[in-house]
Image (cartoon, rainbow, N blue to C red):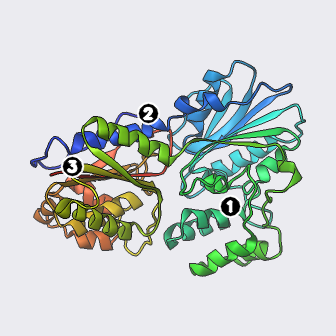
Amino acid sequence: MATENFQTGAPEKETPLAKGPLQSMFAAAIAAAQPNQCIAAHLPAVPKGRLIVIGAGKASAEMARAVEQHWSGPLEGLVVTRYGYAVPCKRIEIVEAAHPVPDDAGLTAAQRILQKVQGLTADDTVLCLISGGGSSLLPLPLEGITLEDKQRVNRELLKSGASISEMNCVRRHLSAIKGGRLAAASYPAKVVTLLISDVPGDQPCDIASGPTVGDSSTCADALAIIKRYGIVLPDNVRKVLTDGRGESIKPDDKRLEGMEVHMIATPQMALEAAAKVAEAAGLSAYILGDSVEGEAREVGKVMAAMALQVARHGQPFQAPCILLSGGETTVTIRGDGRGGRNVEFLLSLGVALQGEPGIHALAGDTDGVDGIEEIAGAYLSPSTLERAWALGINPKDSLDRNDGHGFFQVLGDSLVTGPTLTNVNDFRAILIGR
């Protein structure tokens, strides 16, 4: 894991409870999801034939390195990860591509991965390493759709407010490799998939849009999502969804028989690790949920109300304590600011708290990137709003502009980790002191 670089803001009086434990909890959450800590126990038996390692996601390169460290027999393979997330491997080729909007490098990598599983036998094993971000990193469109079409649809989905499950449903039905198609192409080889979950509910078909698992959703479901968010599709893309070409591989498909799926790291595991750190520091920790969804700013308001109830009335918990949560919120983009769902949540939380004494918070993406910025998230203190006003910054205006990164960066309260080499979604911690 990359070393944290927590940037502090203007001097203020902080209790010892505040920054140290919050940073330590975030670090513990990331450490709990490191591939080298959780991959060895799930490796397949040595096959009679070849072991082909493939994969995609922000953690896939680190997963590949962990496989090499724990596998003594021959192997070969290719995985694709986000730019800046590659790590050195000796036998598995690492390719970098763009995220969250796909590019030509990702397209080429997806084509090559699909080629690597062609012509295998029942004696061979395909080990697929999948983590969050794989949807954008495997942008192989179905015939009749171009990469430009996929990029356009992806951009519209990202700014629509659609949930990650909804976005990935659409992506599965426009892809030549997702929605179980990669596993079907590997038949009759055995397919073993190791997953690091970054999605609420940990559904395998939603992690990187499920390239090696069956999908029970349909093209009709994808079209309903498109209609729900008013997304305008190019005619050729809509035709793929209406003429049957976009239908994914279903769970009962014979080509998926005998495959194995192992969830090796999840948001819940990360939150439990953070809770242990809090408790070791003498703080009661309460996990409110590992799959919180909804508009980030609305989640911020709800969490603020809960924190205030604890601080003012000792209900439902007694302070001092930590409120932990994970999941993936959404942001409907209305402004022209620099934002991400974690800083949007945190800014909304701060506006609702109005500088309530004793309440501090940290929110960050465990992959080190909130939105499209190389910033994981930020830190909020009781003095955050006061310091912003002193600099002539209106916090509510910043929220209206979706400018969370701009707001916290000016204050010096951005959380920068660099590539963490894993991804178990968002981390939120609210510390309520006495």
Label 2 or label 3, whichever lies nearer to me, is 3
Label 2 or label 1, whichever lies nearer to me, is 2
- Label 1 environment density (alpha carbons within 10 Å; few <14, some 14–19, many ≥20): some
* x then y, percent, for residue 308: 22, 64
User: What residue is at 59 percent from the left and 80 percent from the top?
Assistant: 228
Residue 24 appears in the figure = no
Q: Nearer the viewer, residue 25 or 335?
A: 25
Going by the image, does 133 lie left or right of 387? right
Q: Please, what is the three-letter code of the amino acid marked with disc 3?
A: Pro
* x then y, percent, for residue 405: 32, 58
Q: Is mark 3 on a helix, strand or loop?
A: loop
Going by the image, does 266 lie left or right of 15? right
Alpha carbon separation for disc pair 2 and 1: 33 Å
State which tag comes first along the sequence, 2 or 1.
Answer: 2
Asked if residue 44 is positioned above or below residue 170 in the image, the reply reads: above
State which tag comes first along the sequence, 2 or 3.
Answer: 2
Q: Is mark 2 on a helix, strand or loop?
A: loop
Residue 194 is tagged as none
In the picture, residue 90 is in which quadrant?
Answer: top right
In the picture, residue 45 is in which quadrant?
Answer: top right
Label 1 or label 3, whichever lies nearer to me, is 3
Residue 320 is tagged as 3
Residue that badge 2 annotates: 1
User: What residue is at 13 percent from the left and 58 percent from the top?
Assistant: 357
- Label 3 environment density (alpha carbons within 10 Å; few <14, some 14–19, many ≥20): some
Q: Please, what is the three-letter code of the amino acid marked with disc 2?
A: Met
Residue 147 is tagged as 1
Residue 145 appears in the figure = yes
Going by the image, does 261 lie left or right of 279? right
